[in-house]
Image (cartoon, grey):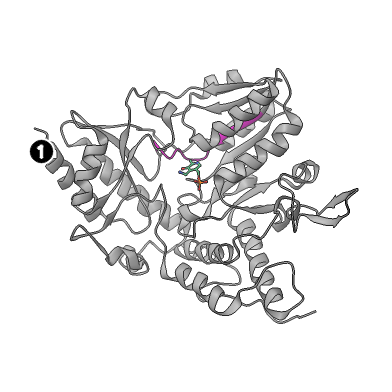
Amino acid sequence: MKTAAVERPPGTAADTTTTARPLNVGAVRADFPILSTQVHGKPLIYLDSAASAQKPQVVIDAERHIYERLYANVHRGVHDLSMRASEAYEMVRGKVARFIGAPSAKEIIFLRGTTEAINLVAQTYGRANVAEGDEVLITTLEHHANIVPWQMLCDEKRASLVIAPINDAGEVDMAAFESLLSSRTRIVAVAHVSNALGTINDVASMTALTRERARNAVVVVDGAQGVPHLEVDVRALGCDFYCFSAHKMYGPSGVGALWGRKTLLDAMPPWQGGGDMILSVTFEKTTYNEAPFKFEAGTPNIAGTIAFGAAIDYLTNLGLKAVRAAEHDLLAYGTAALSAVPGVRLIGTAANKTSALSFVIEGVHPHDAGSILDYEGVAVRTGHHCAQPVMDRFNVPATIRASLGVYNTREDIDVLIRGIKKVQEMFA
Ligand code: PMP
């Protein structure tokens, strides 16, 4: 057995420590090659990180390094390259665990992303534990990825999907949430941060209420928009499952993670069958591997997972406290700037929010505004943001959403505001 140190792609660290330096946005911008590209002859102003964040050079280099120097299938070969690739891949599992405060790397399952993680929980834990008459509690502000898998489960099991409402600011009504918890509740599934509104849910309180009022329930957190902006500690949140995607936190697309408590994972049946999730197979009987491998059938996104580790290092080295402080400042600047434009209405004004500025412009369809802004080089998302119930709640078909990342500046907001004024002139 080889005992050499684990090979690390460029820019990745064995472990990471948080720093308290303020964010140097100028230096950060230089890390992202795409920011020097032009769109329609204008400098790119990227305000769509909630859909997917751009990638720093260290993440691009890490992925390239794997294919150039370290690529082989993982967990299979006794040959040197396969063992080194496996070690680099498994090292990321520990990195993910530390990044979210999980007690053990064995509790981290690599998947395609948040959507797949939520589906896994619904199809394994959910199918085994939800029965006719039971309830799954979600909130109005969920992304479709945290609605549809539960709807499918409830349909199959004749269980009920129960929805905790939100107020006019886009905050979950905690009194209503509490009153909807009962001995019938089996699963509570909530976003850490709403992608459409930017609301930060008080997950720790939601979990505490669940423990008090619905002792049979587990709490699943959709952390897709949490991990890029907040220091996450699953132990402090007190939840049972936490799901997220690498691509929203400056890592590659096609990879993400599910954290689950070991006792729950051990008791859950496997999901997909195939290679790597078994200990032995005969035509009569298959014995499954232990968690997390039990849930990882087939060849994974090897290079993407290792580059995911580089993204965790990158974000950790910036320091999530510094990221949060910078984004908070920019959100306040953007909120004030948008509020000062007559005819612009912000959708989502929670007291505790991050990173997303959703708005509508009076008399202009969001898609028209999005196209005009695009010609100014400004990339924003327009539409329902895979959160149609949120649009229904606010009585709008769609919004324009400017979402912030570590590379955004006040100048980006200024260009957005000038673009909005141009849109208004064209529709005047
Ligand atoms: N939940 C939230 C809150 C999201 O913002 C997203 C992505 N837009 C998802 C879930 C789904 O993530 P993915 O597409 O990476 O699986």
Q: Quadrant of the C terminus?
A: top left
Whether label 1 lies within 8 Å of ligand 1 gets the answer no
User: Dot 1 corresponds to which residue?
Assistant: 426
Total numbered labels? 1
Q: Residue at x 44, y 26 (%)?
A: 389
- The residue positioned 65% from the left and 29% from the top of the image is 153
Across and down, in percent, residue 408 comes to 31, 56
Q: Nearer the viewer, residue 89 or 337?
A: 89
Residue 193 seen in render: yes
Is residue 54 shown left or right of residue 239?
Answer: left
Residue drawn at x 54%, y 35% is 146
Q: Which residues are magenta?
A: 187-197
Q: Quadrant of the N terminus?
A: bottom right
Q: Quadrant of residue 76?
A: bottom right
Q: Position of residue 309 (x, y in %)?
A: 56, 64
Residue 193: in magenta span: yes
Is residue 192 found left or right of 324 in the rendered image?
right
Q: Is residue 395 above or below residue 191?
A: above
- Left or right relative to 245: residue 268: right
The quarter of the displayed image where residue 37 is located: bottom left
